[in-house]
């Protein structure tokens, strides 16, 4: 199968502060993080696009018992991106011990941070992060 956007290209995008997704020409759905096919219709007529990096926080949880190598407590959140898809990431710059449901619906800006590889992953990589923005 011919991938429009490889994992390495996606990772390189994160490194450069770009959020690369795929736009389906069959149904206009945006998929992020990218997959080999459209998340809505499994279509393969895809185009690589740059997302705005803006989203709305939809849900989150505070991790207090973390996998090996991680430093709890921290916040894992899901945000709905301006272009439609929901994506997961760590919410930065918010104290996990002093937060509540008022976070839901806040605007966030995407970023990324490096994480060390562990026994469950294929090595070091970058993951999506969120920070709160005004408005
Ligand atoms: Zn589609």
Image: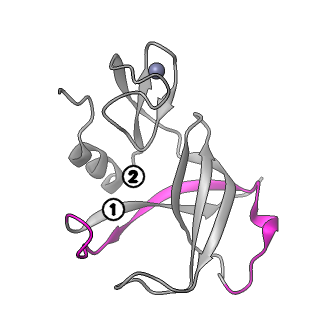
Horizontal arrangement in the rendering, residue 63 relative to residue 107 (left or right): left
Assess whether residue 113 is covered by the magenta stretch. yes
Q: Position of residue 79 (x, y in %)?
A: 61, 52
| Quadrant of the rendered image containing residue 120 | bottom left
Between residue 23 and residue 108, name the one nearer to us.
23
Assess whether residue 99 is covered by the magenta stretch. yes
Between residue 100 and residue 120, name the one nearer to us.
120
Q: Position of residue 82 (x, y in %)?
A: 62, 38
Q: Residues within 10 Å of mark 1 (few under 14, many from 20)?
A: some
Circle nearer the N terminus (1, 2): 2
| Residue at position x 26%, y 50% in the image | 12
Q: Is residue 5 above or below residue 86?
A: above
Q: Position of residue 127 (x, y in %)?
A: 39, 61
Q: Is residue 88 above or below residue 63?
A: above
| Residue at position x 53%, y 46% in the image | 53
- Furthest residue to the top? 26
| Residue at position x 80%, y 68% in the image | 101
| Quadrant of the rendered image containing residue 94 | bottom right
Q: Residues within 10 Å of mark 2 (few under 14, many from 20)?
A: few
Quadrant of the image containing the N terminus? top left
Horizontal arrangement in the rendering, residue 40 relative to residue 69 (left or right): right
Q: Kindly report which numbered mark, 1 or 2, lies closer to the viewer in this rendering.
A: 1
Q: Position of residue 4 (x, y in %)?
A: 26, 28
| Residue at position x 64%, y 71% in the image | 61
Horizontal arrangement in the rendering, residue 11 relative to residue 97 (left or right): left
Q: Judging from the image, what secondary structure is the residue with disc 2 in?
A: loop
Disc 1 to disc 2, how far (Cα)?
Answer: 11 Å
Q: Which mark is residue 17?
A: 2
The structure's colour scheme is one colour
Q: Which residues are magenta?
A: 97-122
Q: Which residue is mark 1?
A: 126
């Amino acid at each position: 199968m011919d991938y429009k956007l490889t994992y390495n290209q996606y990772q390189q995008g994160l490194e450069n502060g770009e959020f690369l997704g795929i736009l389906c020409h069959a149904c206009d759905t945006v998929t992020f993080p990218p997959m080999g096919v459209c998340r809505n219709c499994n279509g393969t007529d895809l185009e690589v696009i740059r997302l705005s990096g803006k989203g709305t926080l939809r849900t989150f949880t505070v991790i207090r018992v973390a996998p090996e190598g991680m430093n709890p407590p921290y916040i894992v959140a899901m945000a709905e991106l301006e272009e439609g898809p929901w994506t997961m990431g760590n919410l930065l710059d918010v104290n996990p011990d002093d937060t509540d449901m008022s976070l839901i619906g806040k605007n966030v800006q995407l970023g990324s941070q490096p994480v060390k590889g562990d026994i469950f992953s294929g090595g070091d990589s970058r993951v999506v992060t969120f920070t709160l923005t005004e408005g």
